[in-house]
Amino acid sequence: PTALMKPLSGSGARGLMVETMTQYGADSFAGRLSCIFQGAADTTLYVVAVYFGSVGIRKTRSAVPLGLFADLAGIIAAIFVAYFFFG
């Protein structure tokens, strides 16, 4: 859930991460994986809405799909890193 929430809402993903660590423990595999997800992806829709708007970029047609693809790559990389170090 943390990985799916991160592109939409950073604070929502942080809440899910804290809930995962509360339920399973901070040193559990799920807790560590949710922490890695927090660092591996960015809040794509926030970046497009706020940062692009502040510099006047209006044509964001390809930025959203590419940003979501980059988040997917970050999620996959986070899973591999978590299994490599903690699995």
Image (tube, rainbow, N blue to C red):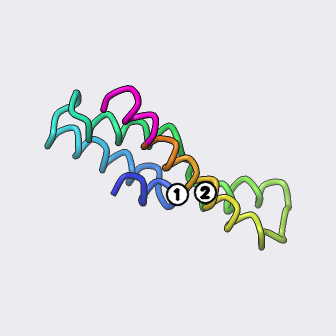
Q: Residue furthest left?
A: 23
Disc 2, SS: helix
| Horizontal and vertical percent position of residue 19 | 22, 46
Res. 26 image quadrant: top left
Which amino acid lies under the numbered mark 1 shown in the image of this protein? Pro
Up the image or down, 47 lies above or below 59; here it is above
| Horizontal and vertical percent position of residue 84 | 41, 30
The residue under label 2 is: 44
**Magenta span contains residue 19:** no
The residue under label 1 is: 7
Q: Residue at x 22, y 38 (%)?
A: 21
Q: Quadrant of the N terminus?
A: bottom left
Q: Residue at x 49, y 49 (%)?
A: 75
Up the image or down, 71 lies above or below 87; here it is below
**6 relative to 65 in the view: left or right:** left
Q: Which residue is drawn at 52% across and 42% down?
A: 77
**Magenta span contains residue 83:** yes
Q: Main secondary structure of the magenta part?
A: helix
**38 relative to 49 in the view: left or right:** left
**33 relative to 8 in the view: left or right:** left
Disc 1, SS: loop
Which amino acid lies under the numbered mark 2 shown in the image of this protein? Thr
Res. 56 image quadrant: bottom right
| Horizontal and vertical percent position of residue 85 | 38, 26
Q: Quadrant of the C terminus?
A: top left
Over which residues does the magenta segment extend? 80-87
Query: Separation of disc 2 and disc 1 at Cα?
Result: 5 Å
Find out whether the residues at labels 2 and 1 contact each other: C-beta distance under 8 Å.
yes
Q: Residue at x 84, y 63 (%)?
A: 57
As rendered, which of 82 and 36 lies closer to the eye?
82
**Tag 1 or tag 2, which sits nearer the N-term?**
1
